Image: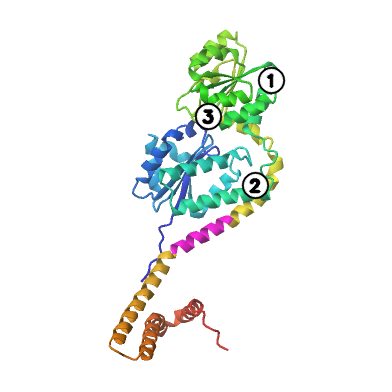
Amino acid sequence: MFALDHSMQLFAFGINHHTAPVSIRERVAFAAERMRDALHDLTRQPQVKEAAILSTCNRTEIYCHTPDPDAPVAWLSGYHQMSRAEVEPYLYRLPQGEAARHAFRVASGLDSMVLGETQILGQIKNAVKTAEEAGTLGLLLHKLFQRTFSVAKEVRTATEIGAASVSMAAAAVRMAERIFPGIREQNVLFIGAGEMIELCMTHFAAQHPKRILVANRTAERARPLADRFNAGVIALADLPEHLAHYDIIVTSTASPLPILGKGMVESALKLRRHKPFFMVDLAVPRDVEEEVGELDDVFLYTVDDLGQVVREGQDQRVAQVAQAEAIIETSVQDFLHWMDTREMVPMIRGLRDHAERHRRHEIERARRLLEKGENPEQVLEQMSRALTNKLLHAPTHALHHISDDERDSLARLISRIYDLPKEP
């Protein structure tokens, strides 16, 4: 008797900007340099066969192949030294088709703070690449993410979901213009040199600020980016002596600890004679200590605050969502069908092995008869009859001994399996 393989269990879970504030998101974020170690640690759990981790400023999500969804969930809180009670209220759990649907929506920009934004697709590709390099991606997740990338491409090609995208960077400029009469008269400091800082520099530089400076852990790594915008470059260690000279500060690093503390900002405010700071902290974990926002002359905005501004400009894309969702739904059904067919593989293999054993047995028998000098024509006839009888014995026996209430359905199934001609 062959059993179906129900081991292909896809499961995704995590938290995002819809379910958790930045104060929780930063605690379950994964630093890029520790991602491989985390993946290895996760797949060492006995029930986790494959895994990929997506960790951005808006979400931490884990996609895995596991028959026991509780195992990776317990691992997440343990890894970050948090109790289950601290994490549970913010978690979403997505089995099988729901996990595939979620991956497709995220990659297509439908689940983003900025509807239709394209940055998330690159972040997913990086997460998949890291999992591949760590050796934690197997057949199931490889197939899931290949489908995910093709669905995202189809959504962006067939709809205008990404058109007129109001990015976080554009929102930061709009917020700054509410604080200062014009950016042209301001000095702008960028902390970090990654993709988000590059986007923000592009938007702020278009407003022609008086001066631009880039601070990075290693100044040399930031120099190519700074040169594009005629900006100066300093190392992070030199921040305290430069901070007071800048009005607008945009920060997005991968630092696990805050870069701008309350004490440093207070000292800079005294030197500025309490001329206000406008700060945008796009990092998760946060680069600016939460207490900085309590200072009188500081306007501090986190990634969640900017999300509110961004949502004001999304109406024109909402009409494209229905078309995108239809594309995604079709793709989810296709992926589930693929998973179902994979579950039948052990049965198909077992069926073929069963037939192969009969074939080999009859071939050996025929060879022995030929070696004895038997008539080849008669040997072939005997072999073909014996093989036919053996292969048809089980379905014939089942039809002879079936109960009345199962007879019709089994007859239809056998007719379909063997493609029998319909009786006139």
Q: In percent of the image, x 63 and y 21: which residue is there?
A: 230
Query: In the rendered image of this protein, does residue 414 appear above or below residue 12?
Result: below
Q: Quadrant of the C terminus?
A: bottom right
Q: Which residue is mark 1?
A: 183
Which residues make up the magenta segment? Answer: 331-343
Query: In the rendered image of this protein, does residue 294 appear above or below residue 137?
Result: above
Left/right placement of residue 357 relative to residue 307 reads left
Mark 2 to mark 1 CA distance (whole Å): 33 Å
Q: Position of residue 206 (x, y in %)?
A: 69, 26
Q: Residues within 10 Å of mark 3 (few under 14, many from 20)?
A: many
Which residue type does callout 2 highlight?
Arg
Mark 3 to mark 2 CA distance (whole Å): 27 Å
Which residue type does callout 1 highlight?
Ile
Query: In the rendered image of this protein, does residue 111 appear above or below residue 32?
Result: below
Q: Secondary structure at mark 2?
A: helix
Q: Residues within 10 Å of mark 2 (few under 14, many from 20)?
A: some
Q: Residues within 10 Å of mark 1 (few under 14, many from 20)?
A: many
Image disc number at residue 156: 2
Which residue occupies the foreground of this view, 185 or 298? 185
Q: Earlier in the sequence, mark 3 or mark 2?
A: 2
Left/right placement of residue 198 relative to residue 32 reads right
Q: Secondary structure at mark 1?
A: helix
